[in-house]
Amino acid sequence: MEKRRFLKNTKLKKHISVSNIINKEKKSINPLITIITPVKNDVSNIKKTIKSVLRQNYKKFEYIIVDGASTDGTLEVIKNVIKNNKKKIKCVSAKDKNLWQAINRGIKLSSGDIIGIINYNDVYYKNALNIDKKYFNNFSLVFLFGSVKKKKNY
């Protein structure tokens, strides 16, 4: 198995999505994309994040949710969404020391050529993975940071 690179010490601000952090050395026209969502105690937002991943136009992806032993019902929401969807979603729940431990746990479980991180309170537009795939196919990228559009909640 090839080594994957990961930027471990990058600090993320709330509401910023990191899209497609890692690209393995081998290029593929239709790569398997792994999406990882680290989450802990966010029962109010996790469902919209999961739904935004599941509605992607690009269908060759796996989705891994890493729950940090939530106590507010988040894990139950995740299990319910998994049960009601045909797409394969992996979910692991264990106590984490920090966000990076959760992300690294997800990376170890991944089998994708490209690995993306979407935080528990963010959403993807429908075509996000298709756009990311095109960038990786057309340019020699190791890292891609997606643009963010923040909507005001009234």
Image (cartoon, helix red, strand yellow):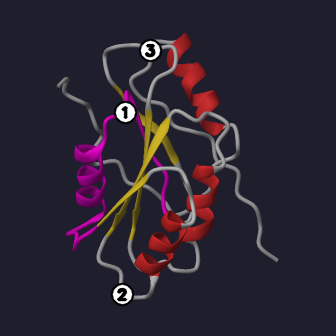
Whether residue 117 is in magenta: the answer is: yes
Circle 3 packing at 10 Å, graded few (<14), some (14-19), many (20+), is: few
Residue designated by label 3: 28
Compared to 108, does 41 lie above or below?
A: below
Q: Secondary structure at mark 1?
A: loop
Q: Amino acid at mark 2?
A: Thr
Q: Do tag 1 and tag 2 residues touch (Cβ < 8 Å)? A: no
Cα separation, mark 2 vs mark 3, equals: 40 Å
Circle 1 packing at 10 Å, graded few (<14), some (14-19), many (20+), is: many
Q: Do tag 2 and tag 3 residues touch (Cβ < 8 Å)? A: no
Give the label on residue 45, or none. none
What residue is shown at x 44% (from left), y 19% (from top)?
141
Residue designated by label 1: 112
Instruction: Tell me where the magenta segment starts and ends, as one range.
Output: 93-120
Cα separation, mark 3 vs mark 1, equals: 11 Å
Q: Earlier in the sequence, mark 1 or mark 2?
A: 2
Looking at the figure, which quarter contains the C terminus? bottom right
Residue 131 image offset from top left, x and y in percent: 64, 28
Q: Quadrant of residue 99?
A: bottom left
